[in-house]
Image (cartoon, rainbow, N blue to C red):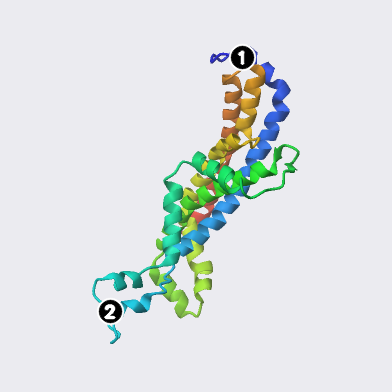
């Protein structure tokens, strides 16, 4: 086993081409499932952070209906449970390493919940794949939440008022007026997050998901080669991330044309 790169070693990897192909399939499926889960959760968290639900609002008023001064009841009247839960979630997930989150979810949560053990595509086990998706999706949602929230808040409030004056409901205003503009503004940040998901999926090999990095470990153990399998994995990740970023950049340019006069 050595760290030097030798061209004569690459032919030794040919018998493992099928394994690398399977690892690529799992990495793509893992990333796609994570993107869907992260996006849905991110939108929900962003709306929770933007909500104005204050169940104890009445405690901020005295018996004459006037606002109280500073005090415990005033602070309690401003308490928003949805915002508090979403903020706590975001801060915890953004302040801890993703590999720790994967370990906690896999060994802690899904160590108690028993999942089916069938194989996906005959490559990897569902009871390992699913916790990986959940962990990565939850981590991605914490970042997407802030991206989506900032995008929504960047839209001029006058547009919301104009939409409401035209008879649109709050849901219709968000769907047809605010979100289309917000998505255009935050598309570069979302694209970057999707590329990050593909790269961060590599840590799921630590719980037995047979992705690209898991195949690298298997090949390394069988051939006693280090750098050559890693270079193959590097090329595969590049072939996934680079085209993805370029495709999203293309759509970003297409969407930006509509906003130019």
State which quarter of the image contains the N terminus.
top right
Q: Can you identify the residue that label 1 sits on?
A: 7
At 41% from the left and 46% from the top, the residue drawn is 95
Is 153 rendered above or below residue 245? below
Is 230 rendered above or below residue 37? above
Q: Callout 1: helix, strand or loop?
A: helix
Horizontal side, residue 19 vs residue 141: left or right? right
Horizontal side, residue 159 vs residue 210: left or right? left
Distance CA(mark 2)–CA(mark 1): 77 Å
Foreground: 165 or 87?
A: 87
List x then y, in percent, for residue 70. Answer: 24, 71
State which quadrant residue 23 falls in: top right
Q: Nearer the viewer, mark 2 or mark 1?
A: 2
Residue 21 visible in image: yes
At 61% from the left and 14% from the top, the residue drawn is 7
Foreground: 1 or 23?
A: 1
List x then y, in percent, for residue 201. Answer: 57, 39
Is the residue marked by circle 2 packed among few (<14), some (14-19), or many (20+) residues within 10 Å?
A: few
State which quarter of the image contains the C terminus.
bottom left
Given the current orientation, which residue lies at the most extreme left position? 69
At 42% from the left and 56% from the top, the residue drawn is 88
Q: Can you identify the residue that label 2 sits on?
A: 67
Mark toward the start of the polypeptide (2 vs 1): 1
List x then y, in percent, for residue 66. Answer: 27, 83
At 44% from the left and 44% from the top, the residue drawn is 96
List x then y, in percent, for residue 37. Answer: 58, 53
Is 34 rendered above or below residue 166? above
């Amino acid at each position: 086993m050595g760290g030097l790169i030798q061209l004569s070693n690459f032919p030794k990897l040919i018998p493992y081409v099928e394994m690398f192909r399977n690892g690529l399939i799992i990495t793509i499926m893992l990333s796609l499932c994570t993107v869907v889960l992260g996006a849905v959760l991110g939108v929900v968290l962003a709306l929770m952070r933007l909500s104005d639900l204050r169940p104890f609002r009445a405690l901020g008023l005295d018996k004459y209906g006037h606002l109280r001064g500073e005090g415990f009841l005033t602070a309690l009247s401003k308490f928003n449970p949805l915002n508090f839960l979403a903020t706590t979630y975001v801060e915890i997930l953004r302040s801890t390493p993703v590999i720790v989150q994967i370990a906690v979810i896999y060994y802690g949560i899904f160590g108690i919940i028993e999942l089916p053990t069938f194989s996906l595509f005959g490559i990897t086990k569902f009871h390992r794949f699913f916790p990986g998706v959940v962990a990565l999706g939850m981590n991605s949602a914490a970042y997407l939440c802030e991206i989506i929230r900032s995008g929504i808040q960047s839209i001029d409030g006058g547009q919301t008022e104009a939409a409401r004056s035209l008879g649109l409901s709050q849901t219709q205003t968000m769907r047809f007026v605010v979100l289309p503009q917000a998505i255009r503004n935050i598309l570069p940040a979302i694209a970057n997050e999707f590329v990050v998901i593909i790269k961060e999926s590599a840590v799921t090999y630590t719980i037995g998901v047979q992705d690209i990095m898991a195949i690298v470990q298997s090949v390394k153990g069988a051939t006693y080669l280090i750098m050559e399998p890693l270079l193959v994995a590097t090329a595969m990740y590049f072939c996934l991330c680079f085209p993805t970023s370029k495709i999203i950049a293309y759509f970003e340019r297409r969407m930006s044309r509509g906003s130019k006069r």
